Image: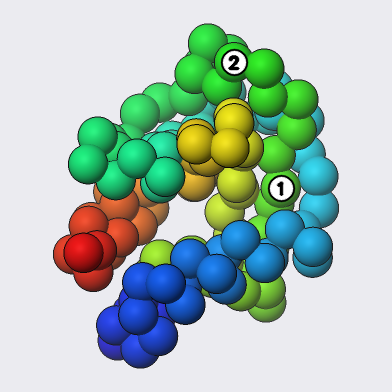
Amino acid sequence: MTLLKNLGLGAALFIISMTSAFAAEVPATEMVGKYGFDWLKPEKAKCVALTAATLPGVKSCKYMKTGETGSFSGNADFYTCKVSEKSEYMVYKTQARCTEELETMKANGP
């Protein structure tokens, strides 16, 4: 069962937002070539291959390693990159993982 089904959307979003205290900072330039979506805009979210232009103004991202709180599927090993108060990307190493996380988020959203 997914994290969202177990806890509900609000609790899952709270957990994801709280994970930043435990995450390691990584330069945003390391996100180029990975895949992500803006989880704060679920109606428009889609997995995209990240480029330097995708994350304007982002200087660093937070890496959530295995063993820390997971993302929408409950798995760790992902990054979060805050663009603004209204935009934050969830970033994954593969397109398949990005698609899985996006589909899980949308399936459990309001």
Q: Position of residue 86 (x, y in %)?
A: 50, 36
Residue found at x 48% / y 24% = 50
1 or 2: mark nearer the eye: 2
Tell me the CA gap for discs 1 and 2.
Answer: 16 Å
Residue found at x 67% / y 17% = 57
- Determine whether 19 is above or below 60 in the image: below
Q: Is residue 24 left or right of residue 36?
A: right
The C terminus lies in which quarter of the figure?
bottom left
- Judged from this view, the residue extending furthest toward the top is 53
Residue receiving disc 1: 62
Please tell me how crowded label 2 is: few (under 14), some (14-19), or many (20+) other residues with Cα within 10 Å: few
Dot placed on the residue nearer the N-terminal end, 1 or 2? 2
Q: Is residue 28 left or right of residue 46?
A: right
Residue receiving disc 2: 56
Which of the two residues, 16 or 92, is positioned nearer the viewer here?
16
Secondary-structure class at tag 2: loop
Secondary-structure class at tag 1: strand
Q: Is residue 104 left or right of residue 30?
A: left
Q: Position of residue 9 (x, y in %)?
A: 36, 72
